[in-house]
Amino acid sequence: MKNMKKIFLLFFLALAGMIQSNALKAQTVTLYDLNPRIYSDSSLVNESMLRLNISVKMQNVEQADSVFFMLGSVANASDAGMIKGKILSTGTYFYASVGPDQFPVTNNELNASILLALAQFQATRFISMRVKDVTGNVSNIVSLRIN
């Protein structure tokens, strides 16, 4: 009976270790410190557009493949729109390619800028972000109320 308890305990500890190991593998990129800044850009000809500057910090940027900017009426939603960018690298230099623009990732911080129609901005209450890594796993989602 005593050996049975030891075997059960060892089995349980091994199983817990495997679960924790898989949980850590499933999330290789982590996002934190989302900081959106909204401003009207005088260089824009159309007054019905505005620019949203977004900074977010990420761990393990070298594992990142795609970044998603989700615009929603609630946190983690994209009912007002989603903008996808690609994380690219040149050696140890990383940047996000969003539409025709490229934004550097410096000291694990992405500073990007997205262009929104005024109507799209008015429909947006939250900006949320997530990253897909090179293996297809999705990071945590960070959200912040902007409107």
Image: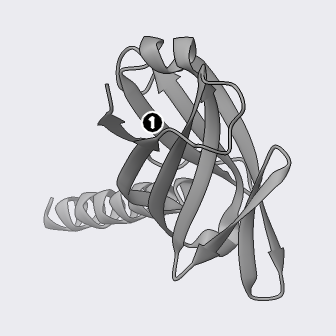
Label 1's element? strand
Q: State whether residue 58 is above or below residue 144.
A: below
Q: The N terminus is located in which quarter?
A: bottom left
The mark total stands at 1
Q: State whether residue 31 is above or below residue 36.
A: below
Label 1 sits on residue: 128
Q: State whether residue 55 is above or below residue 38.
A: below
Q: Position of residue 142 (x, y in %)?
A: 39, 44
Q: Is residue 8 visible?
A: yes
Q: Quadrant of residue 15?
A: bottom left
Q: Position of residue 118 (x, y in %)?
A: 54, 18
What amino acid type should be assigned to the residue bearing mark 1?
Answer: Ser
Is 12 on the left or on the right of 86, as rendered?
left
Is 88 on the left or on the right of 16, as rendered?
right
Q: The C terminus is located in which quarter?
A: top left
Q: Position of residue 145 (x, y in %)?
A: 29, 31
Q: Residue furthest bottom?
A: 92
Q: Along the line of sight, which residue is nearer the eye, 73 or 48?
A: 48
